[in-house]
Image: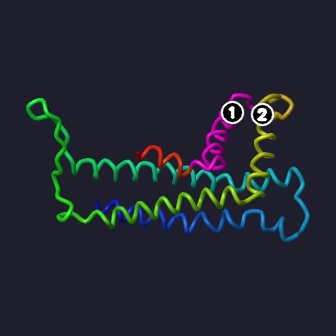
Amino acid sequence: MTSLCTEIDSLCEEARRDFYDALLFYGEAESASGSACSEGDAQIAISRALPLLQRICSFHEHCQDVVANAFAQLAALYVSGTTGGVANNRVIVVGADTHLKPLHERLEALYVTLITLDDIVSGNAFLSDHWSAYLRMVRAAALDPTRFGVDGEKMRRLEKVLDSMGEHLFGQKLFRVIGSNAC
């Protein structure tokens, strides 16, 4: 469990170091100038942010794996079964012999980190506006690939990836998915 605590600490630090500021300050240049960027500039800005958004999705998947591992290890501390037809649940490791509080605190910190990422994304109007404009552009290209000179199959695959990414990032599902899978 110590390695899980260390892993969770590094995940929380990664989010603070790599994601928070980048998401918080996305669109600040547009905000400072006081004028809305043109349609093409919005797509360019979000396309430059796509690697960051993909890293956040990968980060989220890794968080899911770590939380699942933590719950599997916690569940391994208990045995359930039947003895003589009677259901019994017994604790293999007595709580006083193990220190679960640090793991619970780390899981709490990870949940706070994911909730914070959800709030930052939902609170940045530029990010969601630019994302919507980018999706419209990709969908238009996917509907008429010859007009845009692109491979239709590649555009459909890109559209699927973007839909999945957008659903998690802009649907405030970073925490919700992990919270529902942990129960």
Q: Give the range drawn in magenta.
A: 151-173
Looking at the rendering, in which quadrant would you find the C terminus?
Answer: top left
For image coordinates 82% across by 53% down, the residue present is 42
The amino acid pointed to by label 1 is Lys
For image coordinates 28% across by 52% down, the residue present is 74
The amino acid pointed to by label 2 is Val
Whether residue 177 is situated above or below residue 34 in the rendered picture = above
Whether residue 158 is situated above or below residue 100 in the rendered picture = above
Direction front: furthest residue: 86
Q: Mark 1 points at which residue?
A: 154
Asked if disc 1 and disc 2 are in contact, CB closer than 8 Å, the reply is yes
In magenta segment, residue 165: yes
Q: Where is residue 67 in the image (x, y as percent from the top left)?
A: 40, 52
Q: Mark 2 points at which residue?
A: 150
| 10 Å crowding of disc 2: few (<14), some (14-19), many (20+) | few
The quarter of the displayed image where residue 8 is located: bottom left
Q: Position of residue 13 (x, y in %)?
A: 49, 68
